[in-house]
Amino acid sequence: MSEPTEIPPQETAAPSECPHCGKPPALCICAEVSEIDNRIEVLILQHPQEQDKTLGSARLAAHQLKKAKFKIGLSWPSLSKALGREVDPKRWGILHLGSITGKDFPDGRDIAAFNAKGVALADQKAALKGLEGVVIFDGTWAQAKTLWWRNPWVLKARRIALKPAAPSLYGRLRKEPRREGLSSIEAAGLVLSRLEGRPDIDAALTASFQLMLTRYKVAKREAGGKAASRDPETTPKAD
């Protein structure tokens, strides 16, 4: 396989932007969030064309979670190469909704494991047990699909999908092709809270996301409504 197609995050940030979340000072909330000591690691792989400076949540999630990595790129030879250390992909999950719909989920579940064809596995408890980490794709539906197909090693991991009870807090700030659309930080909060049995993780990340959105709305209002962003994250990052 070819060398990894990866863009170092630091090469994409201007000097005036926060080195952690990549946002301008008016939108940065890094000093106001508390670190979350998560047990299951999170690896966020961002498509190079999905580097939203205002409403993107991927870098904030990676900053707030103690065990998290953030990478920009299209492909890596293996999960180990993406992480920078040796790991067993069979002990990792890949959030990828794809063509899976709500009716494909086992009854009563908002998180489920599926095979490569999108069929729910029979023993969900066993499939979701013992995961060491989870990969989240950050990008539009098409970009997430590209990341899935450009990295064959994802098929060695356990495919996971989410069925959130409520739509994303983005609301009218973005258009969602499907109701299941979540920001990266919301996806991370939901998957970790379920896998670790810790609803406090979801609550903390959701609170940070809400604060980020409030900060954006205030900045936009103070600028007379002219602080427009390019289209924000338009896909469920848990796909």
Image (cartoon, rainbow, N blue to C red):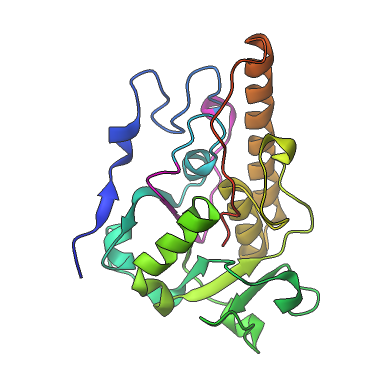
The image position of residue 185, as x and y in percent, is 58, 46
| Up-down relation of residue 103 to residue 176 (above or below) | below
Q: Nearer the viewer, residue 221 or 158?
A: 221
Residue at the image point whose x is 59% and y is 66% from the top: 97
Quadrant of the image occupied by residue 216 = top right
Whether residue 90 appears in this view of the structure is yes
In the displayed image of the protein, which residue is found farthest to the bottom? 122
Q: Quadrant of the N terminus?
A: bottom left
Whether residue 105 appears in this view of the structure is no
206 in magenta: no
37 in magenta: yes
Q: Quadrant of the C terminus?
A: bottom right
| Up-down relation of residue 76 to residue 227 (above or below) | below
Residue at the image point whose x is 49% and y is 50% from the top: 139
Q: Nearer the viewer, residue 224 or 4?
A: 224
* Bounds of the magenta segment: 30-50
